[in-house]
Amino acid sequence: MREEGYISPRQAAVMLWFAILPTAILFLPALLALRAHQDAWLSVIVATLAAAAVALVVYLLAQRFPHHTLFQYCELILGPVAGKIVAFIFVLAFFLLDAVVIREFSEFLVTAVMPETPALFFSLSIVAVAVYAARNGLEVIARCTDFILPLMVAFIAIVLLFATPEMAPRNLLPVLENGFRPVLGGALVTWRFLGQIFILATFGAFVNPPRALRASLVSGLLGIAFFLSLVTMGTILVFGCCEAARLTFAAYALARVVSLGQFFERIEALFLAIWVGGVFIKITLNLYVVALGLATVTGLKEYRPLVAPLGALNVAVAALLYRNISEIRHDLLMVEPGWTLTWQLILPLFLLIMAWLRGKRRTGI
């Protein structure tokens, strides 16, 4: 089974940005300030180097199995039974990831914007739109990113620029006051987000030309690291590590401090609009990947009939995952890093090693 359309290398890189940045810039700076203190920005750099290992594994697998998705070459490497089991593990992992993102989205809106509105209303609203977009295929999702990306980049630049008067360089000092261990702890938390570049293995087969996949991975990872470092550093510079660690939604708090005279302020509403657009792309992309993977595992020729049921199931699971925002933060700090390390690096590396040992390779379509 194949997707009908193709995307450019640039679109693939941008989709990687949207697969990570929307939730990362909202939650990660505060979690990093809690773990790594004023060295939070160093944790992003270390995690980027670690995520490069994932990018390398994705690229090497793509070179061995061009024009095949992750779910297809699991079976090519491990055989029909074991391959389907491993492919289903990846489907389940992306499904749970999408449920977590849906819950993060609804919890943010309920906590920070409309506390009297049921979280289920927000979950149903965004998933309904995501189902429509996912059914239209990868090309449509990629075109949506072309519209939202300039807004997101411009807004991040504006917030950081106009927050400059509130920044205090002393908040970044002293560097490595407590040694390198807190930096490594922060890097492990950051890994939960940066490791998601592995998602390119699921739709890299639809990048045209295939040889440009390396450029997509490199530019995608570097772009994510750049913007995430800027937002993290800006949060520490404005609030200091102690205050930043107490924040729940760091980027939203950063947008609220922006003020220029009496006419340019209260731009958090603009942040909200752009952020919702970014999360919509992330939820849609994950939903598309889950439907595509499940159709591949079950041998269906069409993934679209699965999108709506999977979206409804995502909403139900998202509602059951956590009781409140505190549980989400605890999960991001204590549970997710180990789980994501398993399915985003260890399991793909196992596939690569098995493909090499068994001499598995496909060069045709």
Image (tube, rainbow, N blue to C red):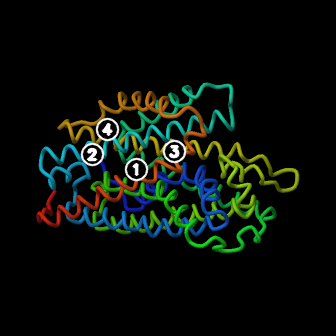
Which residue has dot 4 on it? 291
Residue density around tag 1, few if under 14, some if 14–19, many if 20 or more, within 10 Å: few
Query: Are the residues tagged 4 and 3 within 8 Å (C-beta)?
Result: no
Disc 2 to disc 3, C-alpha distance: 34 Å
Picture layout, residue 19 above or below residue 63: above
Q: Earlier in the sequence, mark 1 or mark 3?
A: 3
- In the displayed structure image, the side of residue 53 where residue 69 appears, left or right: left
**Which quarter of the figure has residue 344?**
bottom left
**Label 2 secondary element:** loop
Q: Pointer 1: what residue?
A: 339
Amino acid under label 4? Answer: Ala
Give the residue at mark 3: 331
Q: CA gap, disc 1 to disc 4?
A: 22 Å
* In the image, farthest residue toward the right: 262
Callout 3 environment at 10 Å: few (<14), some (14 to 19), or many (20+)? some
Give the residue type that dot 3 points to. Answer: Asp
- Near-viewer residue (294 or 173): 173
Query: Closest to the observer: 16 or 85?
Result: 85
Residue 356 vs 266, above or below: the answer is below
> Does 26 sit above or below residue 113?
below
Q: Residue at x 25, y 52 (%)?
A: 69
Q: Of the two numbered discs 2 and 3 on the same chain, state the one appearing first in sequence.
A: 2
For the residues marked 4 and 3, what is the alpha-carbon distance in whole angstroms? Answer: 25 Å
Badge 4 density bin: few <14, some 14–19, many ≥20, Cα 10 Å: many
Chain-order first, disc 1 or disc 2: 2
Picture quadrant of residue 117: top right
First in sequence: mark 4 or mark 2? Answer: 2
